[in-house]
Image (spheres, grey):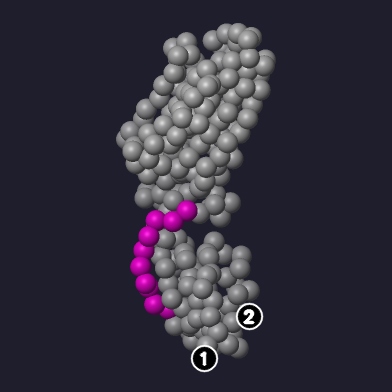
Amino acid sequence: MSQDSYRTIAQCSCEELVINKSRFLGQAAPCATEEEALRFLQQKRQQYRDATHNCYAYTIGSNMGVMRYSDDGEPGGTAGLPMMETIKKQGICNCCVVVTRYFGGVLLGAGGLVRAYTQSCALALRAARPVLMEPTLRYLCEVPYALWDKVRHRLQPMPVQVTDVAFTTAVSFTLLVRSSDERAALETLTQATDAQAEMLLEGEESMAWDEAEE
């Protein structure tokens, strides 16, 4: 993972956990700003306004410069802090997790609450699909028809993405490649086409990559 990379989540999630008749709903959402995190929290408070507790934790910034959490009425240190520690342990930035609890009538004790909120948070993060945000280059490429199958075969096992394929006088496509993989990808494309490929750098952006592609 490069210095400019960071781990976050790709989507919203909601996972249910029942422990000793108490119902826990672990909900996670990607949030680029603190305003987005607070808006997600408010939505969940409204959606589950009949719940016993809506505890939360969120981190904002690729260096986790903003970290906030709340026990929302649970005994101090049994909900928000364990959730925050779970997020930090996984190194996930720009996310908000809300764990909603409906009390089932059985006291869990401090240790039981810590385990319940930790587990609910972890389940929500896993379901939200952790990804790596990495500097990514966008190349517009063009190769002769006769070499297209060879190009596809050579690029297929590489950590790149091929999109916007079009067949006109030649085969054109967009190649998305992380900065760290740029040299290898371009060399492969050049070798596969005997230097007949045309490659134009269109720009650079931060893009999500599945960790399996790392």
Residue 58 magenta-drawn? no
Residue 207 magenta-drawn? yes
Image mark count: 2
Picture coordinates of residue 195, whole percent (x, y): 48, 84
Main SS, magenta region, reads strand
Residue 96's disc number: none
Q: Which residue is mark 2?
A: 149
Q: Secondary structure at mark 2?
A: helix
Which amino acid type corresponds to the residue marked 2 in the rendered image?
Answer: Asp
Residue 115 in view, yes or no: no
Picture coordinates of residue 70, whole percent (x, y): 41, 21
Q: Nearer the viewer, residue 107 or 182?
A: 107
Picture coordinates of residue 101, whole percent (x, y): 55, 21
Q: Quadrant of residue 57?
A: top left
Residue 169's disc number: 1
Binning the other alpha carbons within 10 Å of mark 2 as few (below 14), some (14 to 19) or many (20 upward) gives: few
In the rendered structure, the answer to whether residue 179 lies left or right of residue 213 reads: left
* Residue pictured at 33% horizontal, 33% vertical: 66
Q: Are marks 2 and 1 in contact (CB under 8 Å)?
A: no
* Residue pictured at 48% horizontal, 70% vertical: 175
Q: Which residues are magenta?
A: 199-208
Residue 101 in view, yes or no: yes
Q: Secondary structure at mark 1?
A: loop
Q: Nearer the viewer, residue 210 or 45?
A: 45
- Pointer 2 or 1: first along the chain: 2
Rendered position, 96 above or below 212 = above
Spatial CA span between label 2 and label 1: 16 Å
Rendered position, 14 above or below 158 = above
